Amino acid sequence: MPTSLNPYLGFRDNAREAMEFYQTVFGGELTMSRYADFGMNEDPSEADKIMHAQLVAPGGLVFMGADTPNSMAYTPGSNFSVSLSGRDVDELTGFWQKLSDGADIYVPLEMAPWGDSFGQLRDRFGVSWMVNIGGSPTEPTPHS
């Protein structure tokens, strides 16, 4: 089995809402465990927070997330972006449109200097996303 690189998203008190939103965007199976499910909550008020969530979506998309405990520092969206890239125009444009709901658009989804369609936004949960839609299926592209 090859090694996979999957984004792991940190949230503060809204991991359940965020991961359920991403499930509406990408589809797939979402599993979630609370801190209390494994006796991992040091603070009783954090028992129902999400300790681990995993979304396994069609096409091989897999990502995870969790609520950051109150005792740990949390700075949303400052040190990562999630990159979606490929050649399926309809699928990627659909993801872009759904992620755009309530988002701050930094770069509209449009033709980029390297010849692909590209857009960048921060969604309503503070997560930064880049979407790159490659050229025709017969042309190689370095960004997809």
Image (tube, rainbow, N blue to C red):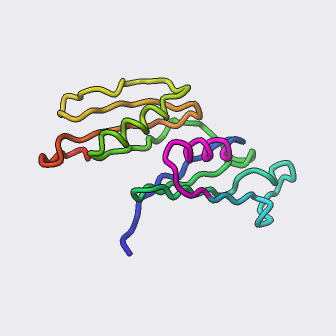
Question: Which quarter of the figure is the N terminus placed in?
Answer: bottom left
The vertical placement of 110 against 53, above or below, is above
In the image, farthest residue toward the right: 44
Residue 73 drawn in magenta = no
Residue pictured at 64% horizontal, 51% vertical: 66
Magenta region, main secondary structure: helix
State which quadrant residue 47 falls in.
bottom right
- Of 80 and 129, nearer the camera is 129
**Percent position of residue 21, x then y:** 59, 41
Q: Residue furthest bottom?
A: 1
Q: Above or below — where is 91 with respect to 48?
A: above
**Magenta-highlighted residues:** 15-30
Q: Which of the two residues, 129 or 60, is positioned nearer the viewer here?
A: 60
At x 62% / y 42%, what residue is drawn? 18
User: Residue 116 or 77: which is nearer the viewer?
Assistant: 116
**Farthest front residue in view:** 90
User: What residue is rendered at 67% in x and 57% in y?
Assistant: 32
- Residues 42 and 120: in front is 120
Seen at 26% across and 47% down, the residue is: 144
On the image, the x and y values in percent for residue 133 come to: 28, 39
